[in-house]
Image (tube, rainbow, N blue to C red):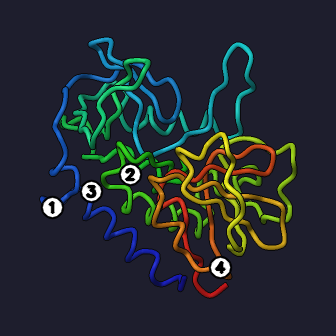
Amino acid sequence: MRTGLIPVIAALLVVAACSKNSPLDAMQPGERARVVRVIDGDALVLETGQSVRLVGIEAPSRGGRYDETEPHAEESARALEDLVMGREVQLVYPGLTRDRYDRALAHVKTTDAAGPAWWVNLELIRQGHVRVRLYPDTDAGGAILVEAEKEARQTSRGLWSERAYAPQRAERVTHEDRGFMLIKGILGDEAERPQEDERTILCTRKLQGSSILIDMTFSARAACDTPAGTPVLVRGWTQKKRMELVHPLHLEILEGE
């Protein structure tokens, strides 16, 4: 992308978040309450006791009793604290409202006069503190999040300046690599679907020059039609050189490569 276009894109994203035509306006309005705790860069707690998982984003984990803290986890959590801690926010629901842990699944926007009006999910992406991760039942507004992430990646903002989060070339991914990953490669032909997942996997595609397989779910059906030979950036949970791709926007066609 030409450098001169980057400020223009950033300005358009701000307009999209704050204008009367924001995609948030078409979603279901939810609770208003003050934020009293930030758990990770994508999770917080309201004064009502309600836990909230910010949809459309994936923040580095601060870890737990048995898990190590991931790179950039503290920076990500502090960024969310800077945006919302102590402020009144409104939850906005793009679809499914609760997960199995009874966490609210929402976009979050600030509503008080204590600071700027933020579409918090979008702002975290724009600053480069989280990655986009979409699910079909909460994906409204996802295209705007994807565009914001592209701009943050291209300017090496936040976690995108760290080696741990750089999109990996397909041929360099090892059998031991595991987790939510972004992988660059050339989309190849179809491969045999895993028999145990035939009810959820619509097609399986190879990445040329590697042994990586991309299992594309029925919810990502549009991605299955991408022609072989297309340079792509794909994202999803990956283990043993196999990625599950659950949303069509998780396949990004790379122009000029």
Comparing labels 3 and 4, the label whose residue is closer to the camera: 4
**Residue behind mark 2:** 122
Which quarter of the rendering shows the N terminus?
A: bottom right
| Label 1: which secondary element | loop
| Identity of the residue drawn at 78% across and 59% down | 212
Depth check: give the residue in front, 93 or 89.
93
Residue type at the position of mark 2: Leu
Q: Residues within 10 Å of mark 2 (few under 14, many from 20)?
A: many
Closer to the N terminus: mark 1 or mark 2?
A: 1
Is residue 175 toward the left or the right of residue 97 in the image? right
Residue type at the position of mark 3: Ala
Distance, label 3 to label 4, CA atoms, is 36 Å
Q: Residues within 10 Å of mark 3 (few under 14, many from 20)?
A: many
Closer to the N terminus: mark 1 or mark 4?
A: 1
Distance, label 1 to label 4, CA atoms, is 37 Å
| Identity of the residue drawn at 27% across and 43% down | 94
Closer to the N terminus: mark 2 or mark 4?
A: 2
**Residue behind mark 1:** 21
Residue 228: mark: 4
Distance, label 1 to label 3, CA atoms, is 8 Å
Is residue 226 toward the left or the right of residue 137 in the image? right
Q: Position of residue 110 (x, y in %)?
A: 25, 38
| Label 3: which secondary element | helix
Res 9 quadrant in image:
bottom left
Depth check: give the residue in front, 141 or 108.
141
Q: Position of residue 90 (x, y in %)?
A: 22, 33
Residue 17: mark: 3
Closer to the N terminus: mark 3 or mark 4?
A: 3
Q: Are marks 3 and 4 in contact (CB under 8 Å)?
A: no
Residue type at the position of mark 4: Ala
Residue 255: mark: none
Which quarter of the rendering shows the C terminus?
A: bottom right
